[in-house]
Every structure is written in structure tokens, then in C-alpha cells.
Image (cartoon, coloured by chain):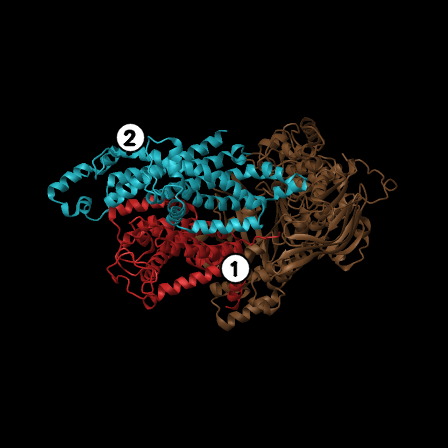
Amino acid sequence: MNNFFKILLSAPFSAKVGMIIITFYLVVAIFAPLIAPYGEYYLATPIAYEVWSSDYWLGTDNLGRDMLSRLIYGARNTLGLALTITILAFLLGGILGMTAAALGGWVDQLLSRVNDVFMAIPSLIFALLILSIFGTSIPYLIGTIVILDATRVFRIARATAMNVAVMDYVEVARLRGEKLGWVIRREILPNIAAPLLAEFGLRFCFVFLFLSALSFLGLGIQPPTADWGSMVRESSTLIAYGDITPLIPAAAIAVLTVAVNFVVDWMLHRSSGLKDVS
Amino acid sequence: MKHILKIVAQRIALGFLTLFAISLIITFGVELLPGDLAQAILGQAATPDAVRVFRIELGLDKPAYLRYLDWLGGMATGDMGVSLSNKRQISELVGIRLSNTLFLGGFAALVAIPLALALGILAALYRNSLFDRSINLVTVTSISFPEFFIAYVLILFFAVKLGWFPGISNISTELSLGDKLYRTLLPAATLTLVCVAHMMRMTRASIINLLSSPYIEMARLKGIKPMRIILRHALPNALAPIVNVIALNLAYLVVGVVIVEVVFVYPGLGQLLVDSVSKRDVPVVQACSMIFASVYILLNLFADIISIVTNPRLLYPR
Amino acid sequence: MLVDRKDNSGSESEPLLQMKGLRIEGLSESGWQEIVCGINLELKRGEILGLIGESGAGKSTIGLAAMGYARDGCRIFEGEIIFDGIELRSASESQKRQLRGTRIAYVAQSAAAAFNPAHRLLDQYVEGPVAHGMLSLERAKEKGRALYRSLDLPDPDNIGERWPHQVSGGQLQRMMVAMAMSCEPDLIIFDEPTTALDVTTQIEVLKTIKEIVVDRNVAAIYVTHDLAVVAQMADHLMVLRHGKLVEVNSTGQILKSPQQEYTRNLLGARSRDEKTPTQIPNPQTLLSIDSVTAGYGKGPDILQDISILVERGQTVAVVGESGSGKSTLARVITGLLPTRSGGVSFQGELLPAALNQRQKQQLQKVQMIYQLPDVALNPRQRVRDVIGRPLSFYLGLKGKEKESRIKELLRQIELPENFIDRFPDELSGGEKQRICIARALAAEPELIICDEVTSALDSIVAKAILNLLQRLQNELGLTYLFISHDLDTVASIADQVVVLYAGRIAEQGPKSAVFQPPFHPYTRLLLSSVPEMRQGWLEETLSSRETQAGIAREVKITEKGCPFVERCPVSIEDTCAHARPPIQTTASSGHTFACQHSAKVLLEESEQ
């Protein structure tokens, strides 16, 4: 535990800032109902696009709902969904990837080929296709993105697991007669945890941006649920008047992604062990 | 020589196989809908007659494989069927949009690629200098921003506040090249910003990786000048990873184009795709998806082939 | 063709290279640490200085410093480096660049890594002279081909047109030496040039190096850990340890009367301790390999018709160079690679060919120790988990019982008990290998396969490991199948020896019989290729007939006939190329070899 905190403290400035920002977002997302001044769907005033005031710190949106509250609830909805999707994608892709690396042979060939086909489809296109057929209900949304993302996770899990699988200590375990599950859990997994964690961060960013993009296009999380992507869409006409309101939810997306990227960058730098001598 | 032709041929075959698989997914994705597609799309207007007509229009009355072959044949000859929403020939709709999208994409790529390569190589050479660190900061933030954020920021500053460029990029064939370039500048700039950021980081990473190779050290120990080391020793080996990076990013461009077209209301294929999705105009969506997917796959195929033919181990086996 | 050394003594009194108080530090996780601590060095024109030491001695770093060069992560922070009057530390980058490649050249350990895979070999040769403006392109190419010819490289006019991956290891290394000569430097630094090569390949490279350096009166710094090799090459030796000087003297003096204990240890580790074979009252066959033929995928047979008997309590050494199939043999025995014909029996019972068909008890009885302890231990597992797992998996031990057994095993491998909670990265190479041995012992096996277990260790540490293995065998009655390429190691530990060549058994029998005439022609080549720790050995060996026939040729796996035919000085035309060599016996019991000639004939040959 001590070691863990020492490592955290040794991080460069950017990573520290990143971690603080991430914590802040998590707190907002978890405690949303306690922090937001108004309800998520609450029609506070009949006046749309009110200016920033002491009642409504960020003004109101196109239906007269308080922007600030919507923003706070948006954190919970968007973050929560993105996190769920990333975790599911990771479980799917990770387990399949490690299995393919550990078993090799035709299992690996089959899984890799199938994975290649799915990876060859541009994600946005595929998502749009599915959504146009099935409509934009949340389960289909989750399912689509999970499958698409799992392909990338599969690839990196397989690659890192393969690097480990050729090590003699894995052969030692196999020669002992250990079962596949044990080999994956005790020999392979502990040694690929670090790069996988970094990948988790990157995947989360991607899912997060992707969800926002879909919502922005009107095809993701549907109103009236508060979601940053669709909030940008709803207030986009204001840009023509020089009002920066649409930029606020967009900035909220950007800031979190930047923070995660800073932390991931640091993690990758640590694990690659590059010697930086000027 | 024969050996490498075989590898390339295998790769091309794989590419076509993938295209085939995707076309299957695109056409038969429709089958997976629980319940009936006609019902789902027509919704309230699903009278028995309407449903029947709809099914005939979509060819749902024919057996699946016939439908697929029809569609395939159609795609190959340029007849992509008819749009559900406005009853026009899809090929008409798609034709002009595709050329607009290619124009936008091409414009962005022509600026982004040389810029990204130059910055990436310089950052790798002057690793950890102020230049490198600041570029790194800028690119990390750049790849973290959603495209629509960058797009709106650009619009806010350059279109609304400064009034230099139009916020809506309406182009048509009658415009001159200069005019077209002027109107597409902001959307192209958005695409470029994101692409340069990705490409530069990947280039930098592969060059750094290359520079730590033992033969680079050997060249230094032979007293070769640094510029010559970069050009004659590093670059020939960097060709494959760099081409890979470019192809991956061009493929990424294909997707980024969609968002940008929507924000700037640019009459391209991406805009068409998104509109059709909201209208649930399935044949148009299928056609557009197929085109995007093909471009994506072909770019990846191209990258793979380049990395095969630049590898002396494969060109001249033992 | 080796010419007598030119007499250098009076011509140049000024040394070519001088180092005074050289200090170099390296960056590690815990900050900057000194890796070279105050070295003084002098080298005259045409002299060869050997830098000898184990890993971490700093010898490579000093060699590179002679060019004023420090690797990434290292910096020269004190001292003077004077090359022909030019002080290198204060010289500009441009000055240093002009010297490198032209007056001081470098030969790396791995030619495959040092050559750029994207350029042809001759192009890389001419790069130096052309880039430094010394020769025109055409002239440089001519010189290159002439040099290849004088070094006896095959097809000298065209070999330069090849790519690095198309040329064998020994040839590539020689071409790297040629490349170093391209600008006719005054000093060449050889950084472990033959460490990665087989002994039979090593000889051809040593010959090349000696010719070049002697013929053209080039000064050289020869960095190595192998005393026997450097004894052939150097006039003076500098013994290094942990970046400090231990001893420096002429080669002859160091070999005959070393002053320091560390030097004596180095000499001792390298000397051959012949083991007296253990006598077993009732020999019991433990492992029987019967006519095994095996290969990978659809490829050719890597092992052909291998039959070996391993008796309980003995050490059977399997000797082979690269391409011999010895690692494949280990995989067949453990079940990782199924046989194509023939089988492996343990204690009379035929073992199922595939690993997943074997019973736990069968797996338990045969344990393996690997070459690279870094890779054989899971970096995320502590010693207690590494040794504890076989205890719980095979023997069902738990809790206090398991803990005390782990401690007992630690004592047996001569490590302190408090190592039990350490991670592998907190252990040295030798300690890690001991843990691997303990892991094998924990299963309470009958047979342990040792796959090149000392090849990656420093010689002093390796010797300690061999002693440990021998002691454990005496105490516990273990049986070893010892795979190695190093004949000295084999001599000190084996009872029986099996010599593998190109997947076939060339010769096998009791060690004393195999290491004495009559020899299979390959065994003879092998034995004569092992450097002895005396000066002049290289010249002697090179003049012998078998070396001249055998070196500079590749190992070819053949379907019919004898695979050694192209390298054999006594091969019979036609017969040896087409007919399988029959198994011959000798006067010693249990000693057989595969050759067309009988033992008597070969005995006469060896007396010539």
C-alpha cells in the first residue's frame, strides 16, 4: 500500500492534475443528486436560453431546464454508461484475448480471424448501421459499442499475453500439469496488468468520445435524459450568436478525456522503462 | 520474387474476403431484427397493404441469397437501389456526395500528412526538448477533444467573432476551386487538427523505437553524420511503420469526416449517412456503409502491402 | 594465413591510446551509479590488449570509451582519453566523428543486430570510406571484395550483394570485421565478437581477427569474458571487476602466475575438472529414448532415430551445437513435441507422446531447469510461491509443513532462509538459477533435465552451480540429463556423453571413452575447437587437418547419407553422401559411433 502511494506521488505534474480531475468527475457523478441545485428533468422556467444568472449559474437550455443541473446529471449518465461499456468490452476482449494467446493453434487462428473482420469495419459506420435498423435503445447501443471495442481490447490483450506466454515460466507451469485457467490467472494476468490498465484508460476515452459523438448526432442517449453530447446538439444554434453555452458540455467531455490521457501517458511511460538522458 | 507475390496475393484475397464478410453483415444485419423490419420502420403506417408494398420494395419477399446477389450485382454495376425516403436513385444521391467527401478528406490529408510526419520526426530527434514536450502537450489535448468541440471552437472564433470564414460550408459543383477551398477550410482544419495529433504521436513513437536499434548505434560508431544516419539508416526501416500510421489515420479520417460534415452542414456522404439513419432509410444506409467500409478496408490493405514489399527479408528470402 | 608479428618495440614510444583516471557512471532506477571507477590504460601501436571480466565489470563501457563514446544512459564524467595526442573528452562532436570509423573502428557482439537489415552488405562496407571522403565508391567496392577474398569468405565477389539475413552467423561476423577494416584504422575495438557463436564457428572468426590485426599491424582492444579465447589473441591482459582494475600484465604472466585471488578464481573456473565417473552397483534404466524421430509442423525431421539410455544416478550429457536438435530432444522428452516415430519410456513405462495425456505422477518425476533464469521465473511471484507451488500441487503440502519444507530446500541450495519473501528482481543470476533448482527439487523428481543451465552465467557462478548440482546428485541420488554445448562443463559433470550432430547421434558412450580416440570425425572437430588456456593454441589448431576441413561450413540436415560429409576430412567419396553410416563399436563397452570407418581405421587416422 505504501508503495502504491509512493508511486502516485512520483508522477509528473500533468498526471497529478489528471488524477485530481478524474477524482473530481467521479465525485460529481456519484453524488449528483446531492450536488445539483435542480432536478434533471425539472422545467425550471418557461424561458428558454436564459442568460447566466445567480438563479441559473449557467443559464437554461432550450426547454428552460437549468444547465448546471443537467451538466451534473450528465456526468452521471455519460460517465456511467461509458464506464459500463468499457468494463464489459474489457471482460469480453480481455478473456478471449488471453485465451487465444494461451491456447494458440486453431483456437487462436479462429478468434483472430473473426476479430480481424470485426475490426475492419469502421466503428461509427457499424454503429450507425445497427442504430438505423434497431433504433436507438440503450441495450442495443451498449451491445454494439461493447462488441466493437472488445475487438481492440482482444488485440492488445492477445499481443501482451503472447509476449508472456512464450516465457519459460509459463512453460514450467504447463509442464507441471497446471490447468489453463490457473495459467491465465496466476502466470499471465499479473504480468500484463500494467499495459492492460493503460489500455483501459485509452478505451474509456474512446468509448466516452464515441458515445458523445453518437449523442451529438442525435443517435445516442436520447432526451430528456441529460447527456453532454446531446446537450451540445440542443444548444448548437447559439454558436451563431457568439454564445459559448454549447461549448460547456463539450468542454466537460474534453477536460475529462485530457485528464485520462495524461494519466495513461504517464503509466505507459513508466512501464516502457525508457531511459531519458538528455 | 515468386514468394513475395504469393504473400501479396494472399493479403489481397484476405482483403476481399473481409469485404465480402462485411457486405454480408450489412445486408443481413437487417435479418436479425426481432419481429418484422417493415413493421418496425413503417410503425403506425403499417397497414397490411403498406407492409406488403414495403416488403416488395426492399426485396424482402425474395429468398435471402437471391436478395444478396441482387444487391451485390447492383453494387458492382452502380445500381444501388432506391431511397426509401425520397424514392430517388441512390447512385445519384451518392455520386456527388462521395466526390464532395473525397474533396474534403483529400484537402485535410494533403495538409495533415506532411505536417504530422515532419513534426513527428523532429519530436523524435529532439526527444524531451522543450519543443517535444510542448508538442506532446498540444497533441494530447488535441486527441482528447471531441471533433465537434474543435469544430465549434473554430466556428466561434473564425466564423462568428472574426468573420473570416463561413460557418456553414455549402459547396456545389459550379463553384471555382478557390471558392471551394475557401468554404471548406474550416471543416478541413478541424479534421487536420485531430489527424495531425494522432499521426504525429504514432510517427514519433515508431521513430524513437527505431532510433534505439543497434544498427543505428553502429552507424554512429562508424562516424556517420547524424543527418545521413536519419536519411540512410533510419528512414528505410521507418517506411513500413510510417505508411502504416498514415493508412490507419486516413481510415480514421473516414470516420471523422461524418461528424465534421454534420457540424458544418457540408453536403458529403457522411451527412447523407447520418440523415438516412435518422430517417431509417435502410437501403441508403447500406449503400453508404458499404462505401465507407470499402475505403477503410482498401486503405488498410494498401498499408499492409507496402509493409510487405518494403521488407527485404520477404523480398529476398534466404 | 598467419604472418609473424612485426617488431614494434623501438619504433613508436608514444602510446597510441591512453586512459587516465577514467570514471563513467550509468543511470539506473536508483540514480547515477559508477560503473567504471578510475581506470588507467596504455596501448601501443600494433598491440593487442585483452579486457577480461565477468558481466558488470565495465569492460564494454571502457572499450566504447576508447572512441570517446558513451551509450545512452551512461556518461563519462572524469578522466582523460588520449588517442594519438588528441584528448577525446574535450574534442568536439565533429572531431570525434572524424576519428570514428576511420582511425578507430568497432566490432559489435551481434553482427545480425549491427548490420542494417535494409541495406546490402557491401553497401554498408563502403559507407565508411565513401562518407569520410577517403575513397571513391568503385574503388571502395573493389577493396571490399578483395578483403572478402583474402578472408576466405565463400563467393567473395558476390557475397557483398546479399542482405544480412541471408548470410550465416559466422560469415556475418567476419564481414563485420572486414567492415571495421574498411578505412584502415589504427585501432579496432572488438566487443565480445565470438560470444554468441558455436565453438566450431568461433574458430573461423578468431582466425580472421588474428590475421587482420597481425598482418596490418593494427592495435586492438579485445573485450571478452572468455580467458581461453583472449589468451589466443592478446599480448597483455587487464582483469576487471565491478569497474575496477584487478590485475594487468602480459598474457603469459597472467596465465602462469596470477597475482590476485580473483584472477586465480577466473582461471580456476575455466579449467577443466575431470569428474571421476560414478560407479553404480546395480544399473537401473530410468529413461529410455527409443529410435525417436521428431520434427515441427510439416517441416523436416529435426531428430532422426535417436536412442539413448539413461541409468539411475548417472549424468548423461547431450552435447551439440546450434542445429544439432538438442533443445528439440528436451521438448520430446517432456511431451511438448510429439514424436513422429519411436517413443520415450520412463521406468519401463511408455510415456504418452503428448503432454496433456500424461498423468500427474509421470509429470512429477521428470523436472526441467532452463537456461535463462530471468525468463524462467515469474517476476510477480515471490520465492515462497515459486517453490511452494510444486509442493502443494504434487505433494499436497500446506501451511507450516509447506513453509518448513521451503526453508529446507533453501538450505539445500545454499541460500539464506530470509530469501523466502524475495522477488526475482531482487536476486542475482546465480541465485535465480538456484531457486529454479529448488523448484525442480520440490517436486521430488527422479530425473532432472538441465537445459544449458550454466550457459548464461558468469564462469565463477557457473562453476558454483555445477558443484551444487553434483552435490545434490550425491546426496539425493538424482539422475541428470544435461544438455550443453560447452565441452568443459560436460567434462566436469558427465558420466555418459551423447554427441549430437544435425539431429543424429554421432557418438555416445562413457565420457572417458568419448573424449579419447578413436573419435567420430565431428567429435574430433568439436574437441579440437575448444580453446585451451595457453598461447599458441589457435595457430596449432588451425593447421590441423580436421579444422581446415570442418570450419566455415554450415550444419546441413540431410535425409540420406551422413550429414557431416561436407566437413569431414576422411569422408569416402559417394558412399558417405548416399549411405547411412552404420553404428560402429569400440573396445570400451557401451561406446558406439556412426561412421563408415571402423574404430581401428579412425584410431590410425588420429595418430597421424
Residue A13: give its label: 1
Q: Position of residue C443 (x, y in %)?
A: 52, 62
User: Which color was chain C given?
Assistant: brown
Please name the residue that numbered disc 2 is placed on.
Answer: B78
Decide if residue C225 is in sight here: no
Q: Amino acid at mark 1?
A: Phe
Nearer-the-camera pick, C171 or B208 = B208
Q: Is residue C78 left or right of residue A40?
A: right
For disc 2, the chain is: B
Tell me the crowding category of disc 1: few under 14, some 14 to 19, or many 20 or more residues within 10 angstroms, Cα based: few
User: Which color was chain A given?
Assistant: red
Please determine whether, in this image, residue C133 is positioned above or below residue A178.
above
Nearer-the-camera pick, C115 or A167 = C115
Q: Position of residue B248 (x, y in %)?
A: 43, 41
Callout in the foreground (1, 2): 1
Tell me how far mark 1 sits from mark 2, CA to CA. 56 Å
Q: Is residue C284 left or right of residue A192?
A: right
Residue A128: quarter of image: top left
Nearer-the-camera pick, B57 or C416 = B57
